[in-house]
Amino acid sequence: MLAEADALVLVDAEAEALVDAEADALVLAEADALVDADSDAEILAEADALVDAEADALVLAEAEALVLAEAEALVLAEAEALVDADVLAEVDALVEADALVDAEAEALVDAEAEALVDAEADALVDAEADALVLAEAEALVDAEADAL
């Protein structure tokens, strides 16, 4: 009976060892599965985070591009308005200068014409005075000649 009891103890020990080994194998398999699942979840989370970061970066880049394009359009519009204002101011200044030149030229022409008219009037007065003096001198000469 001792041998039988020893055999039973051995069988029990072997069965317990097998159960422990199977339990250990199951625990290891479950642990590996959990590690794999955690790794997959971490990889998916990292990939998701990378996709989100790239999407955010693209949205920011597009927003920056839009802001830059709008700013460039505003700067160009302001520059165009300034150039237009400068051109209009220069045109106004040229028109004013042209009007001043025309007015000065007209004043010079009027002054020259008036001077010519005055000179001709003076010449006519002088000619008439000379004619009168000559006529009086001739009359005196004739009177003296008649008196003699």
Image (cartoon, helix red, strand yellow):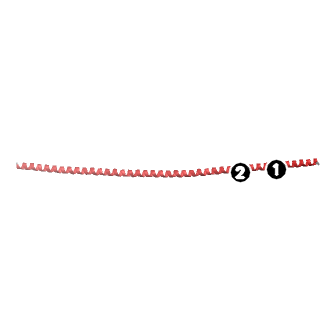
Residue 32 vs residue 68: left or right? right
Furthest residue toward left: 148
Say the numbered circle drawn on residue 23. Answer: 1
Say the numbered circle drawn on residue 52. Answer: none
Q: Earlier in the sequence, mark 1 or mark 2?
A: 1
**Residue 139: x %, y % from top left:** 10, 50
Q: Closer to the camera: disc 1 or disc 2?
A: 1
Q: Which residue is mark 2?
A: 41
Residue 14 vs residue 96: left or right? right
Residue 64 vs residue 84: left or right? right
Q: Secondary structure at mark 1?
A: helix
Q: Is 15 in front, or is 108?
A: 15
- Residue at 79 percent across and 50 percent down: it is 27
Measured Cα–Cα span from mark 1 to mark 2: 26 Å
Callout 2 amino acid: Ala
**Residue 89: x %, y % from top left:** 41, 51
- Residue at 57 percent across and 51 percent down: it is 64
**Residue 100: x %, y % from top left:** 34, 51
Q: Is 13 in front, or is 136?
A: 13
Callout 1 amino acid: Ala
Q: Is 12 in front, or is 63?
A: 12
For disc 2, the neighbor class at 10 Å (few under 14, some 14 to 19, many from 20) is few
Q: Is 2 in front, or is 47?
A: 2
